[in-house]
Image: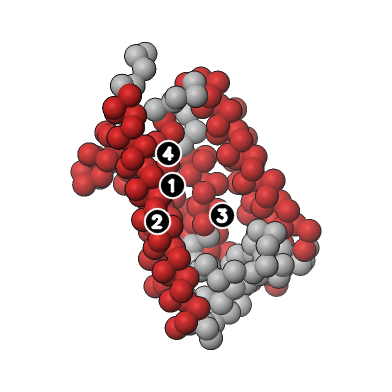
């Protein structure tokens, strides 16, 4: 398979970085709006919180899953495609689009943080609850895994389960946030692969 042209790769990275900056800006603006206008946002009841015990150390499963998921993705990518893989810009663009959409949804559905000790390992931050960006990222790693290498997909599926367990047991996200994160990632990948309006970006990032 011929390697991508340098100009094409540079353009792909430019698109991915541009979308990433846009997503980061939208996330920060959404956070500012949530803090200023929705300080008294509701903290809804969650049936799974009632059924499952609260296990504070389970929050570390979030770290294990996230680091492991990106590690598996990058190792597989470098092993099969090399350090200059054309898959990286496309993956970056998909992640950016998912977080851009998430920034909008968090403002449309403002909820108070569910954290016991934080969804990650830091102090609780109000970056929106619905949908879960943690679960969205893990689901993207699963959906972007090559179907011809099933062991990669199985590993990502196991890590996604660990992520969900960690978030629920440590009260990192409501259960509806978790479902929303999965659905958002699925819609983002489907749109990236099939929506006509996104086709020029998809082609130029090497998809």
C-alpha separation, residue under disc 3 versus residue under disc 4: 16 Å
Give the percent coordinates (x, y) of residue 63. 68, 50
Q: Earlier in the sequence, mark 2 or mark 4?
A: 2
Give the percent coordinates (x, y) of residue 100. 38, 57
C-alpha separation, residue under disc 3 versus residue under disc 1: 11 Å
Tell me the mark number nearer the camera, choosing from 3 and 2.
Answer: 2
Residue under circle 4? 91
Residue under circle 1? 95
Residue under circle 3? 134
Q: Earlier in the sequence, mark 3 or mark 4?
A: 4
Q: Residues within 10 Å of mark 3 (few under 14, many from 20)?
A: many
Q: Residues within 10 Å of mark 4 (few under 14, many from 20)?
A: some
The answer to which image quadrant residue 47 occupies is bottom right
Q: Residues within 10 Å of mark 2 (few under 14, many from 20)?
A: many
Question: Quick check: marks 1 and 4 in contact, CB under 8 Å?
Answer: yes
Q: Which mark is residue 174?
A: none
Q: Earlier in the sequence, mark 1 or mark 2?
A: 2
Q: Which residue is at a point 62% across and 72% down the rendered structure image?
A: 114
């Amino acid at each position: 398979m011929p390697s991508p042209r340098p100009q094409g790769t540079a353009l792909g990275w430019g698109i991915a970085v541009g979308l990433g900056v846009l997503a980061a800006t939208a996330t920060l603006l959404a956070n500012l709006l949530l803090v200023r206008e929705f300080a008294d946002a509701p903290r809804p009841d969650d049936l799974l919180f009632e059924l499952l015990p609260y296990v504070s150390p389970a929050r570390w499963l979030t770290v294990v899953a996230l680091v492991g998921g990106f590690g598996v993705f990058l190792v597989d990518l470098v092993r099969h495609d090399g350090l200059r893989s054309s898959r990286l810009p496309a993956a970056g663009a998909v992640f950016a689009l998912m977080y851009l959409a998430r920034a909008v949804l968090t403002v449309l559905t403002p909820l108070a943080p569910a954290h016991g000790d934080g969804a990650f390992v830091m102090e609780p931050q109000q970056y929106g609850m619905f949908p879960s960006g943690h679960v969205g990222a893990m689901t993207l790693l699963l959906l972007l895994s090559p179907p011809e290498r099933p062991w990669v997909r199985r590993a990502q599926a196991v890590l996604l389960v660990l992520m969900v367990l960690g978030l629920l047991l440590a009260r990192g996200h409501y259960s509806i946030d978790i479902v929303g994160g999965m659905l958002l990632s699925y819609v983002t990948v489907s749109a990236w692969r099939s929506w006509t309006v996104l086709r020029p970006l998809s082609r130029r990032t090497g998809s």
